[in-house]
Image (cartoon, helix red, strand yellow):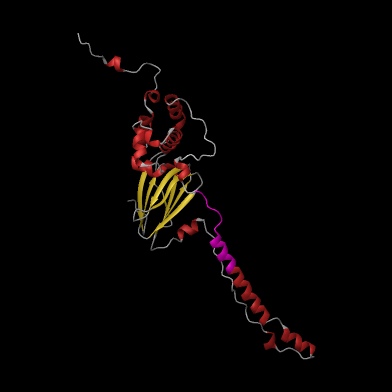
């Protein structure tokens, strides 16, 4: 009689859930694979360094630099692969002596906090605008000073009728340059330049992580696009896109709407060039 385990012995006990049996790193790895993302994709999307992503998926939290930073990385990676971070954080706290006490006045180096924050006012643009206003005002004042009607008043005081040629005033010039307002309507997309490729990405039906690069591989944008938000990218040759949830995205390429039937949650890698929309 064989002493080996039968297939029935290898099955999990009833009530065991798969997420309870998987380690934190294994759960993140399987969710990433299910989302169709590589480790490079996740590292680029979250700004978590590649070695740290590999270490966490191997359940090695030493490279994170402490429990506080490890919890932040776990939360960020879970969101990137569409996984609820709460059970993973609870398991991490149970395995590492509970949730760490909050550190007052110390920034958490979570990946989402590494993103560039909004700067203060653009004083350079404000100074340029102020100079334009001053120049326009000086020009307008000089023009009005040269034609203030003093000649006509002198003729009336002398009892003479001002001539028709004297009363004719030159058409004032518009010395103040008009600053075009940004056009966010569909007409702005339709007026896309023919010598470039213009791509507008809109989160019409929900939020989606997107990544955009130009023809040289330079990163144009990498992050989460919330529902109702849109981004426009332009390059001389081509624009490369990665859509984390293509079903939530509406694309306009070179002024034309892309009517692809993408499924919710589908990851799409696209390339668009000049001319008619072409999927790379």
Q: What stretch of residues is rendered in magenta?
A: 117-131
Q: Is residue 123 magenta?
A: yes
- The answer to whether residue 131 of the structure is visible from this angle is yes
- The N terminus: image quadrant: top left
Residue at the far top: name it. Answer: 1
Q: Quadrant of residue 85?
A: top left
Residue 29: percent from left, percent from top? 35, 33
Q: Is residue 26 magenta?
A: no
In this rendering, position of residue 4 left or right of residue 104: left
Classify 42 as above or below 215. above
Residue 229: percent from left, percent from top? 50, 48
Residue at 29 percent of width and 14 percent of height: 9
In this rendering, position of residue 189 left or right of residue 150: left
Residue at 43 percent of width and 43 percent of height: 209
Relative depth, front residue between 188 and 222:
222
Q: Main secondary structure of the magenta part?
A: helix
Picture mark count: 0
Relative depth, front residue between 46 and 5:
46
Residue 65: percent from left, percent from top? 41, 36
In this rendering, position of residue 174 left or right of residue 94: right
Residue 3: percent from left, percent from top? 22, 11
Q: Quadrant of residue 193?
A: bottom left
Residue at 44 percent of width and 37 percent of height: 76
Classify 247 as above or below 163. above
Classify 7 as above or below 210. above
Relative depth, front residue between 4 and 185:
4
- The answer to whether residue 38 of the structure is visible from this angle is no
């Amino acid at each position: 009689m064989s002493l080996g385990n039968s297939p029935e012995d290898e099955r999990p006990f009833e009530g065991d859930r798969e997420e309870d049996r998987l380690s934190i790193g294994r759960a993140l790895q399987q969710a990433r694979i299910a989302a169709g993302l590589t480790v490079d994709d996740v590292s680029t999307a979250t700004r978590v360094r590649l070695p740290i992503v590999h270490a966490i998926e191997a359940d090695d939290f030493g490279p994170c630099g402490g429990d506080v930073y490890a919890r932040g990385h776990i939360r960020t990676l879970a969101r990137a692969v569409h996984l609820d971070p709460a059970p993973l954080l609870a398991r991490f706290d149970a395995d590492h002596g509970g949730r760490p006490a909050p550190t007052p006045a110390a920034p958490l180096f979570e990946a989402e906090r590494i993103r560039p924050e909004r700067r203060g006012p653009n004083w350079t643009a404000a100074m340029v605008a102020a100079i334009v206003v001053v120049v326009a005002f000086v020009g307008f004042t000089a023009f009005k000073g040269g034609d203030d009607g003093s000649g006509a008043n002198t003729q009336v005081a002398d009892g003479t009728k001002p001539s028709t040629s004297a009363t004719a005033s030159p058409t004032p010039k518009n010395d103040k340059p008009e600053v075009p307002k940004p056009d966010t309507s569909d007409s702005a997309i339709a007026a896309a330049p023919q010598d470039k490729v213009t791509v507008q990405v809109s989160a019409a039906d929900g939020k989606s992580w997107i990544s955009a690069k130009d023809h040289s591989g330079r990163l144009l944008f990498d992050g989460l696009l919330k529902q109702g938000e849109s981004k426009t990218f332009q390059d001389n040759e081509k624009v490369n896109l990665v859509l984390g949830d293509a079903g939530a995205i509406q694309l306009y390429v070179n002024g034309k709407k892309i009517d692809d039937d993408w499924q919710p949650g589908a990851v799409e890698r696209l390339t668009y060039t000049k001319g008619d929309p072409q999927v790379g």
